[in-house]
Amino acid sequence: MSTATSAGIPSNYPLNPARRLQPPNEVRQLAVGYQKRAPVLQGVTPVLDSSKPSQLKGQGSLAFKSQANSYKPNTNLFDAKALTKPLPTNRWWLNLMIEKGADPIHPYPYLVHCASNGSSIGFPKFSSTAQAVTSDQVIDWQVGDGGGQLTKRLVTGTDALGVQVTWSGLGEAQMNARFYKGMVFQTFEMKQLTPLLKTDHAIISVEPIEYTGLNPREHIAHVVRNVADMPALSRVKLNSGAEWLIASKPAIQWKQTSGGLTGQAQYTGFVQLAHLGAKPDSNINVIQQYAGTYATAGSVTYAKAEGNGNSRSASIALYYKTNNDVGGDTSNVHSTRSVSPTAQLLTFVLPHHVDRLDSKSLLSPGLTGYRSAKGPLAAIGSNLICYKQELQSVDFTGSNTITDADKTRIQSQLAKDIAQVDVTAKDPYFFGKGVARVARLLQIAQEVGDAASASTLKTKIIALLQPWLVSQSNSDPLVYDNIWGGIVSSVGLGDPSADYGQGRYNDHHFHYGYFLYAAAVLAKHDMNSFAPLKEATNQLLLDYANPSMVDDQFPYMRHFDPYDGHSWAAGLFTFGDGRNQESTGEAINSYYAAYLYAKALGLQETADFYEIVLNMEAASARRYWHPTRAQATELYGEGFSHNAVGILWSSKADYATFFGANAEYIYGIQMIPFTPATKMILAQDWVKDAWCPGQGACPDGMKTAAAQANKNGWAQFLYTAYSVVDRNAALDNALSCQPDDGNSLTNTLHWILTSGQAPNNP
């Protein structure tokens, strides 16, 4: 770790105050392209260096044939010189780069559209019904140029947390914005234009605001700031009931018109907008103190684990560089209260952040009336969001010791299932499920000491994977997409609806996670036999979970969103509700498989990294997809009557799946596949709450759903889940069901015996 200089400021920070407090005479650009290095944070030792090539990277040659994707990037929407292959395909802001770029993005708590002549901002209002939490898409402000000079907008930069958009057109007129989740202010840097804030609502009043609660002069990191240097503030009331705080520097003399507010011509500076929430009179007293500071770059650092055994945790640090650039003091990773608010960001955090933040980090008094689809937002005054992620230990084997009697029972079932190990599916998803099912049998055979079965299963797995990963002789071979940068199926490359959107990067972590699990088990038990498959397997893993920011073939962590703490699955498909993820069980499996694979290969720092990501994904699944009914009321409102979410979007939550609304689908898709990692998301209190034996109280409970599923594979998943409460009651019911194509009776029996709990023994 580099040695930090001067009061804990990262070593790459400019120490000359004049360089940090640049006058707003030009638009400051986030360095174009993808930001590939995070700052060094004092007290936070990264688990790996993402600015270096991954340990998984081979000699650079591709294991798959290269082919062009028929779906081309729209270069009218992004700077093709700044953003080059590998291009992002699953980022939360991706609507800006695909199709016509017209659908919104959701930098909580706002809704943002970016058109060619400016940006539109709304403050979504959420409502809940029994089946969903939805939000409106009402726009309050359209930000642009009153002179009509802005005619083109491009995505011009990205980093691990956000995106930069730049507008240009006639003459020197330019506007720039960086969108990050959780920012109280939406900020627009302007150059040589006439600021215009249009609204479809009637403006009731525009009131200039004097700063309150600030000392006349603040000393921050040896830089003197005068209140006179702070932005000018205006409080604006709309006839919709909404109230906004508008900040500008240099001060804009707003002129009210029938269509909004207009500033002076040839303006260079910045404009900030912040909604004043449910209690404007009290919220404004907090928000105004943070006016003038905004994020210019974002990074994430995953720290090395601390502690031992089951008491381990890792710090997750979300860090924002600002225009003032005095937030670099990272000596206290939980709170920067010693630094004046006038130099800090005012940032919202999600419920899972609040659960793990030092309580002193939260503002008191806080802000009222802000939320996202994931529930209420809390405010923190800091450039650094740092929290502890507890790490649940997980391995190839389950947590319970297998008794001799249980081994005999498992061996008996294994002898029956080993005769049914053919995998006939031709697409990556169902083939992946099939080969992972066989790999589970291999792992179980090793655990129960059945060497003959293990040898047979090992040979079968090699035979199944070889046509996909070596000879590429299967009917739907994988190829490297040399346009976007990733591995896709041949059929999916030409048909966006084929293979569950494979060619458009939908669900890659779900699909390839199954391949990786099979590879991990094979590598663990016979590295020599696995060796011919290694290079292709490495590249499948890099496709969906590349830990390096400097790879020229695969993007950094394609699906994972470090702010939300989970993955997004939708790929190159645009939705008005933003990104989404349905199957948290398969997302968790993908990072579990990555962890096991790196561990089998002896890549310790890579394994440690994946262990952290796995635990983050699992924690978010428990928090947002698996709430108890009381927790669901907290997050989703009293109208939402369930304790499970089927699909979570950027701006809504659905009690449904993409393939049906049956309760067993909604519960089951959040669990599969059943491996030792599944126990990470089957919290006993949630399963008890979801089982709900009192059918009159919750007819949607898992017990009722399992009965209605009539002994099929979905019913088996629910009975297996109940084993964390009472494995004795679950066992016979689970074994009486017909397994799903990715499961087996051997795996069901083994899981209940090795991960289930005896009754009244939590």
Image (cartoon, helix red, strand yellow):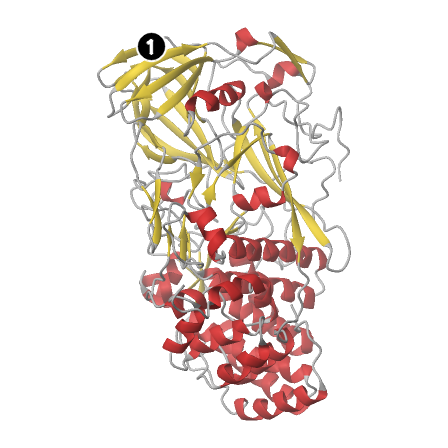
Q: Is residue 519 above or below residue 455?
A: above
Q: Position of residue 568 (x, y in %)?
A: 45, 52
Badge 1: residue crowd in 10 Å (few <14, some 14–19, many ≥20): some
Residue drawn 33% across the image and 17% down it: 171
Q: Is residue 413 above or below residue 576?
A: below
- Kindly tell me whether residue 526 is visible in this rendering: no
In the picture, which quadrant includes the N terminus? top right
Q: Position of residue 692 (x, y in %)?
A: 46, 67
Count of marks overlaid on the render: 1
Residue drawn 52% across the image and 66% down it: 687
Q: Position of residue 111 (x, y in %)?
A: 37, 36
Q: Position of residue 345 (x, y in %)?
A: 55, 27
- Kindly tell me whether residue 3 is visible in this rendering: yes
**Please, what is the three-letter code of the amino acid marked with disc 1?**
Ala
In the picture, which quadrant includes the C terminus? bottom right
Q: Specify whether 463 is left or right of 695.
A: right
Q: Specify whether 315 is left or right of 519.
A: right
Residue drawn 38% across the image and 60% down it: 503
Q: Mark 1: which secondary structure?
A: loop
**Residue toward you, 642 or 231:** 642
Identify the residue under disc 1: 265
**Residue 277 position by quadrant:** top left
Q: Is residue 414 above or below residue 41?
A: below
Residue drawn 52% across the image and 22% down it: 286
